[in-house]
């Protein structure tokens, strides 16, 4: 799979969460595209996994974070529309039986995304249903078109890009492996309630 578009943006910033001493050649390749807008970048998911598997977990946990928060809590940019959209998407995922749903507020951690909505699907068919329903509801109720989608055919990690809100749908193995909540541990968790 060729990494491009939103998945490139996600993985670029995902990689920046790791201590650079563990993957110098990966960082040198990714740093060629500081704005994360490489038209098509030929770094495969497998090569990313290979680099991540080289990282001893004890060292990862003991290393200080590479990226300090970019803003202090008083100056975090406002984005009520992004917040409301993230909550609405989380509710759609819950209604379509997605599991382990998390909404992360990334505004104090990165300038690239404002919110992640992360969930686990039980099967390829169910992940497709969740993805399709998110797209339908967001277009109908919010007037937003997705900017990009990655991983739909493989259905192990589907990424939907709505600009400030990025949806990450995983199968259970990929969710455990990538562990985005740990990688973005400085992000604030946003609570939401189900639609009634």
Image: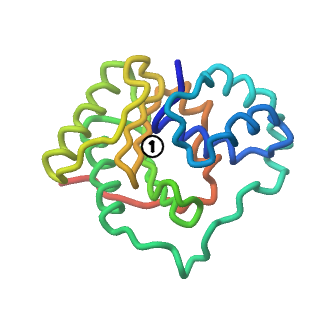
Residue drawn at point x = 81 percent, y = 28 percent: 54
Question: Which element type, helix, strand or loop, lies under badge 1?
Answer: strand
Say which quarter of the image contains residue 49: top right
Toward the viewer: 56 or 44? 44
Toward the viewer: 6 or 171? 6
Count of number-bearing discs: 1
Q: Residue furthest bottom?
A: 74
- Asked if 31 appears above or below 131 in the picture, the reply is below
From the top left corner, tell me how far across and down residue 157 is, in percent.
47, 28
From the top left corner, tell me how far across and down residue 28 is, in percent.
76, 37
Is 140 on the left-hand or right-hand side of 127?
left
Toward the viewer: 68 or 96? 68
- Asked if 60 appears above or below 56 in the picture, the reply is below
Residue drawn at point x = 61 percent, y = 46 percent: 13
- Label 1 Cα crowd, 10 Å radius (few <14 / some 14-19 / many 20+): many
Residue drawn at point x = 79 percent, y = 48 percent: 61
Say which quarter of the image contains residue 146: top left
Query: Which scheme is used to colour this image of the protein?
Result: rainbow
Is 141 on the left-hand or right-hand side of 30?
left
Q: Quadrant of the C terminus?
A: bottom left
Toward the viewer: 31 or 193? 31
Residue drawn at point x = 60 percent, y = 21 percent: 44
Say which quarter of the image contains residue 122: top left
Q: Which residue is mark 1?
A: 118
Is 55 on the left-hand or right-hand side of 30?
right
Is 128 on the left-hand or right-hand side of 190?
left
From the top left corner, tell me how far across and down residue 97 is, in percent.
30, 35
């Amino acid at each position: 799979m060729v990494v491009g578009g939103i998945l490139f943006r996600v993985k670029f910033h995902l990689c920046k969460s790791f201590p650079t001493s563990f993957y110098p050649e990966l960082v040198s390749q990714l740093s060629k595209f500081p704005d994360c807008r490489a038209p098509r970048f030929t770094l495969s998911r497998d090569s990313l996994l290979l680099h991540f598997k080289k990282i001893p977990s004890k060292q990862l946990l003991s290393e200080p974070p590479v990226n300090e928060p970019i803003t202090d809590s008083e100056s975090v940019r406002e984005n009520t529309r992004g917040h409301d959209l993230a909550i609405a998407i989380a509710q759609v995922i819950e209604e379509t039986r997605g599991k382990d749903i998390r909404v992360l507020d990334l505004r104090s951690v990165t300038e690239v995304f404002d919110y992640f909505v992360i969930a686990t699907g039980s099967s390829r068919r169910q992940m497709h249903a969740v993805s399709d329903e998110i797209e339908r509801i967001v277009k109908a109720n919010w007037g937003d078109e997705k900017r990009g989608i990655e991983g739909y055919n493989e259905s192990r990690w589907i990424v939907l890009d709505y600009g400030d809100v990025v949806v990450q749908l995983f199968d259970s193995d990929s969710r455990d492996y990538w562990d985005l909540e740990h990688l973005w541990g400085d992000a604030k968790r946003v609570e939401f309630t189900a639609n009634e």
